[in-house]
Structure formats: C-alpha cells, structure tokens
Amino acid sequence: MTVSDVVELEGHIIDSGLMERAFTVVMELGGEFDIEEFRVGTSKDEESYCRMRVIADDEGALHPILHELHQSGATLAAPTDATLTPAPADNVVPDGFYSTTNHPTDVRVDDEWVPVGNIEMDCAIVVDRDGEVSAETKVLNGIEAGDLVVTGDAGIRVKPPERPRDASGPFGFMQGGVSAERPSESLIRDIAEAIAETKAQGGTVLCVAGPAVIHSGGGPGLARLVREGYVDAISAGNGFAVHDMERSMYGTSLGMDVETMEHPRKGHKHHIYTISEVIRAGGIEAAVEEGLITEGVMHECVENDRDFVLAGSIRDDGPLPDTITDAVEAQNAIRGQAREADLVLMLSSLLHSVAVGNCLPSTTRTVCVDINPATVTQLLDRGSAQAVGMVTDVGTFVPMLAEELLE
C-alpha cells in the first residue's frame, strides 16, 4: 500500500528549472508523481502552475521527498500551521528544528502566512506572538530559553528567487555565473551600471576586500569608490587594513614597492612597523586624525564616515586595535553589514567572502572577482539568481570599475 501527498508549484517554474528539479527529486528518492493540473504561462509576465501528487511506498520514504521539494519552493496543497516548540534552554534548539535556506521564507501561524525577517541560511526560525505575530531567523547561539522555535517542515513556504527575465545587464536571464571569456570591459561596464543603479535607488553597496586588492595595485581605485560614495561599507580582515595603511606610510604592500615592484631594504618589516604605529596612535581613526595615515581605503572610511568591519583570525600579526578578535562578535558585526547590503562586491577574499555570503539572502546582488576560477565558482554557487563572477586580476578590475563610475 502506498502513501501520497499533493504539492503545488507556482511562478516561472519552467525557465527557472523548478519543474525539472521537482521531477528529479521525486525519481532520485524512489518516488513517483502524477500531474493533476498543469497551467503554462503563455506570456512573459504570466506565471505557470503545477499541482502534483507525490507517491511513495510509506511515510518514511515520502517525508524526505516532500522535504527536498519544499526546499526547492514547492508547498503542500493543504498547508497547516507551523509547529512551534519552546527552546528548552539558552543556545539549545528543540529536536527537529527547521534549518533555514537563504531564500525568502514565510511561516504559517494562526492560518496566516508571516514573512520571516533577516533571512539567512542555517538558522532557526523564532516566532514572536506578543502583539502582532512576527518571525525572524536566529543563529543557534542567539536562542533563548522559551523562544518559540519552528520544528518540522509543516507550515513553511520557501520562495527561491527566479532568474531575472530582463536579459540586460550582468544579472540578466542566463547571463549570471562565472565569466572567464566574456569581454572584461563590457562586463565591468555592466557591473558599474548595476552599482550606480543601486545607489540611485538609495541602496547600500558592501565591499568584501582581501589584501590582494592592495598588493595588486587596486587600493587607490577602491579608495576613490569609498570617497565618492559608491562603496558604503568595507568588510575585511586585519591583513587588508595593514596592507592599505602600510602603503600610505611606506609606499609598500607586504614589503614590495607597489609602484616599482622592487623590494626596498628592510621592507619586509614595514607591515609590522605599521601595526605598531597604529597601536601607538590608539587605532585607525586616531592614526588618520593625527596625520599618520594620509591616504588609502581606511583613510577614506574614517574621513567619510564609512562603516568597516575587520574580522580577525589566528594568522594575524598584531592585530590592529580595530580588529575584532572574538569570532562570535565578528560574525554579528558581519551579519549587520550583510543585512543592510543591496549589492556586494567580493574582491579576492575567499574566506571573508564565504563569511559574508553565509549571511546574505539569495535575493542580494553579488559580484565576485578573483584570479582563481574555483574561488569564483565556490562563492557564487549559493542558490542566488542574481550573481555574476569574473575570473580576472582584481588589480585590473578595480581601477577599471572606478574609471567607469567616476569618469
């Protein structure tokens, strides 16, 4: 005797690949399906609809299929309210808690769909029933005893973003992804237009930058973007800030003259001298105010009141006084930046880009630039429909981007 349940799929489910994924999931997990209703959108703006009965040998086989379909955006035809279970203690979630994706999500409470705030992958959903019902994600170390945590898959609706149907621009339909062959100049022009559009709409641009930006000669270009307001916030590590300020103080990056590519005598000590001087001054802001740091990205952040987060690691020299050495505190600071961002530039910084990417909803526009194709692929393969990557030298990309935006 078999068991079954009915799911629905709505939207641009054909060209977004949702239909294909749904069929594949059912068959790969040993189930069968019966299409009960299928309406195809006949115009660009008309959505399609599919009602599908999923069949399996028993409940144990059916549940994993429904779970995977749900993660892809399918919903039960007869939805029920979400199951809410109190957290037994601080930092402890109930058994079977629902772990979020990075897609927009709704939770059903008292027969009403409630949008989940601050969507982020690998979190719990906590419902607040005091006053107007609301729901938001919480990381596990943010759970408090008594929080009403969503458990199971019932009463949850996931909405994976569809591919943009406008073919223009870097995020256009079937144009996203990793690009090693598209003409760099035209793609950079498209990215510049996306940044300008974001700013014109009052949006926020976050730049995740690695030390290679400074080392490859991209520092002055990024500093200009910060100064002129095209970059609103910087997320980086201790090394990026040290390289940037070393360039201001000594004209070198990790001991190498960034203009002549020569290694001056004792240049290998410049980065640690820089750290020492900034510590003596009392931090980056104080070093800028007393004239120790006169140019560069960090200088422009201080002078123009741009937000920056420097997250530390066990590899750091110093570290700088502004570097956050508590991992949880650094995560929370990065999370705050990610939630404000409308477009994110990831420039030659795999580890910090992964950290920021983990906090981003799939609807946030993302641009990743790295000389390593594997890095670009890894950063963009996160279920985002609005992501574009360039395999190129960041030292070429940043000056060209600044030129497109500022000249």
Image (spheres, grey):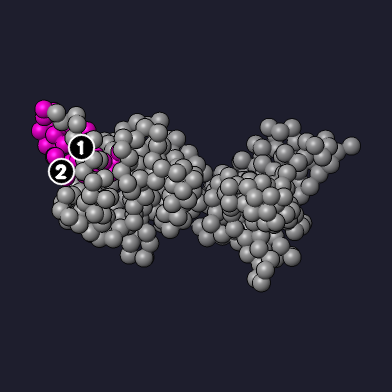
Residue drawn at point x = 35 percent, y = 45 percent: 323
Q: Which of 168 and 170 is in front in this view?
A: 170
Farthest residue, direction front: 280
Q: Left of 360 or right of it: where is 198?
A: left
Residue 134 magenta:
no
Dot 2 surroundings within 10 Å: few (below 14), some, or many (20 or more)?
some
SS under mark 2? helix
Residue 188 visible? The answer is yes
What is the spatial separation of the Cα atoms under label 1 and label 2, in whole angstroms? 10 Å
User: Which image quadrant: the C terminus?
Assistant: bottom left
Q: Which of the labelled discs sits on residue 249, or is there none?
A: 2
Q: What is the x, y in percent for residue 18?
A: 60, 45
Residue at left 56%, top 59%?
117
* N-terminal label among 1 and 2: 2
Labelled disc at residue 273: 1
Residue 221 in view: no
Name the outermost residue toward the bottom: 131
Q: Which residue is drawn at the image coordinates 70% and 38% (left, top)?
A: 26
Residue displayed at 65% across by 71% down: 132
Q: What amino acid does circle 1 point to? A: Tyr
Q: Give the range drawn in magenta.
A: 239-265
Query: Circles 1 and 2: CB distance less than 8 Å?
Result: yes
